[in-house]
Image (cartoon, rainbow, N blue to C red):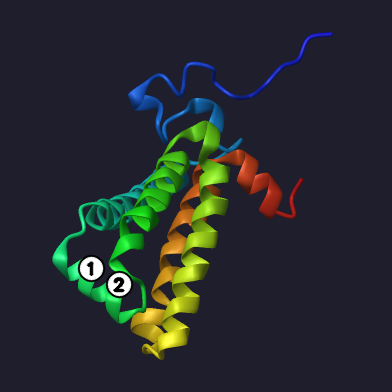
Amino acid sequence: MTLTTDVNPGAAMNPRAVFHGPDRAQPGSTKKKTWTGRILSWLAVLFLLFDALAKIAKVPPVVEGSAQLGYPEGVISGIGGVLLVSTILYAIPRTSVLGSVLLTGYLGGAIATHVRVGNPLFSHVLFPIYVAVMLWGGLYLRDRRVHGLISSNR
């Protein structure tokens, strides 16, 4: 018995294959949808990478902001490391769904933190939801596996 897969085995090794795997495009999708998904995904990835690296480097404004949210300085690098790994997993086509799930959990923790300290709704509490919409929306538009899970058209 031969097992077949729709995953391009060389995609993870080719840097250009990130978000560009032809096997990931939805059947019958337009280039416009695929590119919109890639752009949404890259915007979210760039923001999350910037945030992760700032946490790992313990940039002073990040340390101050984290302290205001109730996080001691000693845990900031670890939080940044978790964010970095999750974001990298999202950026790799083969592990993008796992990365999305991990980032959803991370962003849920951010929402809970902002609610706990009483931050404003639209600028702070809902911001992680905006990022999650970009993550999942981008993945939905560029990955047929996710489209198949979410879409009622099977």
106 is higher (above) or lower (below) than 129: above
**Nearer to the camera, 86 or 17:** 86
Q: Most extreme residue toward the right, as rendered?
A: 1
Name the element at disc 1: helix
Report x, y in % for residue 32.
Answer: 42, 45
Residue type, label 1: Val
- Report how far apart the C-alphas of labels 1 and 2 lie in the structure: 5 Å
The residue carrying mark 1 is 63
Report x, y in % for residue 139.
Answer: 51, 48
Q: Most extreme residue toward the left, as rendered?
A: 60
Residue type, label 2: Ser
Circle 2 residues within 10 Å: few <14, some 14–19, many ≥20: some
125 is higher (above) or lower (below) than 35: below
**Nearer to the camera, 100 or 137:** 100
* Residue 15 is at least partly visible in this image: yes
Give the label on residue 66, or none.
2
Quadrant including the C terminus: top right
Report x, y in % for residue 60.
Answer: 15, 66
Give the label on residue 30, or none.
none
Quadrant including the N terminus: top right
Report x, y in % for residue 79.
Answer: 39, 57
* Residue 32 is at least partly visible in this image: no
Left or right of 54, for residue 78 = right
Name the element at disc 2: helix
Contact, mark 1 vs mark 2 (Cβ under 8 Å): yes
Which residue is painted at 53% across and 36% down in the image? 95
Q: Quadrant of residue 17?
A: top left
